[in-house]
Amino acid sequence: MKKTIKGAEIAIKCLEQAGVETIFAYPGGASMELHQALLKSKIRTILPRHEQGGAFAAAGFARATGKTGVCMATSGPGATNLITGIADAFMDSIPLVAITGQVPSTLIGKSAFQEIDIIGISRPIVKHSYLVLDVDDIPAIFAEAFHIANSGRPGPVLIDLPKNIQQEMSAVSFKSTPALRAYHPDHTLDQKDIDHVCDALEKSTRPCIYAGGGIITSGASKSLAEFAKTNKIPVVTTLMGVGAFPENDDLSMKWLGMHGTVYGNNIANECDLLIVLGARFDDRVTGPPETFAQDATIIHVDIDLSEINKNKKAHIPVIANVKDVLDELNKRKIKTSHAAWLKQAAKWKKESPLAFSRKKEIVPQEVVSLIYDLTKGEAVIVPGVGQHQMWAAQFYNYSFPRQLLTSGGLGTMGFGLPSAMGAKVALPNKTVINIDGDGSAQMNIQELGTIHNEDIDVKIVILNNQHLGMVAQWEDRFYGSARGNTDLRNARSKRPYPDFVTIAKGYQIPGHEVYEKKDLKGAIQEMLDHDGAFLLDIHVEYQEHVLPMIPPGKSYKGILVD
Amino acid sequence: MKQHTISVLVENKFGVLARIAGLFSGRGYNIESLSVNSTQDPTISRMTIVTSGDENVIEQIDKQLNKLIDVIKVTDLAVSDFIERELILVKVAVTAKNRSDIIQITEIFGGKIISVHKKELAVELSGNGEKIDNFISLLAEYEIIELVRTGRVAISRHPGVTEA
């Protein structure tokens, strides 16, 4: 007779079989069986200090590597605390498996203690979800979940596991292959599509590549570089696509959209052929879609059929893995001739580079620029959300995929610290820097505890302007600077509030404050040289605005540069 | 805005209806009628969804439905010839004087009297939406006590399966 083991142990064995090395898991009544099973596993279990931190850390791990991140929480509040992290992963197509404990199946529907319908709550923000009602279904469900999360267009999958199922004994077999008759994420390449792309390219006199996160997801950066360089096509990326193409290349037009470069927005809008690779015409990129690239023939390559014609009509749709498409294109000899266009691109790039004015005081842009210099452009940067995020994306030059890990679609404050933590766990040999704002940093600051306890060497730089800067910027631009709860200062405090270095000290993480320009370089260097986590609280002016800026509802022609 | 009848084959699992309903509500699409039941294969259910929208909306509905893991096949019936039916059960108050009129109307429409009481009749009728509407408007001349109408079901007119 086969040995029987608990459902919880079966679940953990399934994680091992899926190749999971690390799980970010916060225990509770309905998930403690799983934690007991983890004690017997070689999987590294990291205890975050808040379930939301765990979800971001797992997704940060996934963003840094492309491997599926795994987080776990108990039922009820544990599960609801994962929701923001799951939504963030959904919006950015990040492979994530979230496991939630559930009250015993006999109590479901009775408003039991810590019962919540997490399947219902999470439904619009998951790629798929499972409520396990039979212990013998666990292997198949886990195999399916990992397959779905990290195939096609990746996304989060939630598995809700009632406590009685975790406790039930069974001798199930682990040899289960996903049996999903309706899920076919792979698309075979149609050579006719490639012909159409080649024809369009040969006819074009003003081509432009608009590359998104799909390039990074599919590991197509090298293929993209070959395609762009062979055919001399300028490349502009989305925020999610930063690093998909080296920004120090002559053909790079950096990134486009509301706070993208003037030249990047010009090139995408004035081209006659827009080659969209794994991007989705987000409103922060296009502004009003009808005015975006309005004279261009649009080639839209995406693995997700539903993105075609969703926001912008595609003249040549190609439903396929973007890497397959690029590899096929790289086999073709395409006769392109657009020397005048390249000259125009170079002119735009020279005319209006990203810039900031240096002042007596420290400005946030120069901090990012200095971090770039001192890390020789090799660090992985993980910002929160807001002005500092845009500056981190603008004034660091990214040269490899997965170098900027940022909350693009959902724009989630509090993303930075836990995501950087997950990224550093995945990349122990890389310098990982969380560039944060003082607002964002206060959401999920409890993860300093995880960072210290687990010896995770994350460098934390707070661009502290004592404001919710991005909203304050909009107030300055569109609301006569009336501050609608965007000022984080404390009237009774004689110093900037809060004192982040003292908070870090409470978690036994060293740090420094920087007020003056003369101390800046030395402080950043000290942080980089320090063996272990380190926090730098840099006091900057709040009057700085993120520029360029295309005001909401305007086309690229309305771009503001001062 | 054109009305479309969309036939969706789905896995016969719990929660599938909620996923589909959530897709419609979350993206602001309208469900005008819906009917669901299992097919000859007990692991597969068929949903017939009547919705309306411009070309872009219908295209997105089709694509978004196809993205759901439990959706096996989506067929927009508007692109070919199809047969549609709805069913109503209706109770009508009757008097000795008008009873025969109501029975006659029912017979003209091919309906059935399914229950008879001294003061009321229950009638069953199936047909396409227009026929059902016409029948109801004629009965409205009398006193309708209660009416229940199903969602639309539909099937292609061509030989072989609707999905072919």
Image (spheres, coloured by chain):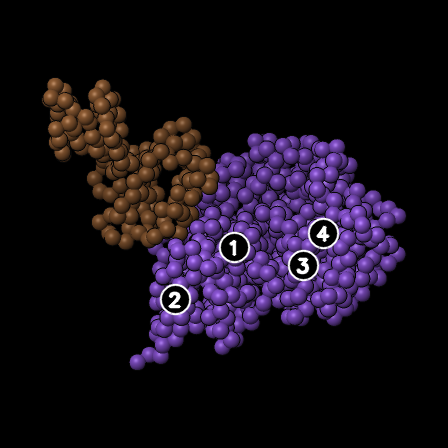
Chain colours: A purple, B brown
**Disc 4 or 2, which lies upstream in sequence?**
2
Pointer 1 residue: A80
Q: In what element is the residue under mark 4?
A: strand
Residue A455 visible in image? yes
Q: CA distance from mark 4 to mark 1?
A: 25 Å
Pointer 4 residue: A437
Amino acid identity at mark 4: Gly
Q: CA distance from mark 3 to mark 1?
A: 19 Å
Q: CA distance from mark 4 to mark 2?
A: 43 Å
Amino acid identity at mark 3: Ile
Q: Is residue B129 left or right of residue A149?
A: left
| Chain of the residue on which disc 3 is drawn | A
Quadrant for residue A481, please give it: top right
Q: In what element is the residue under mark 3?
A: loop
Pointer 3 residue: A445
**Disc 2 or 3, which lies upstream in sequence?**
2
**Disc 3 or 4, which lies upstream in sequence?**
4
| Chain of the residue on which disc 1 is drawn | A
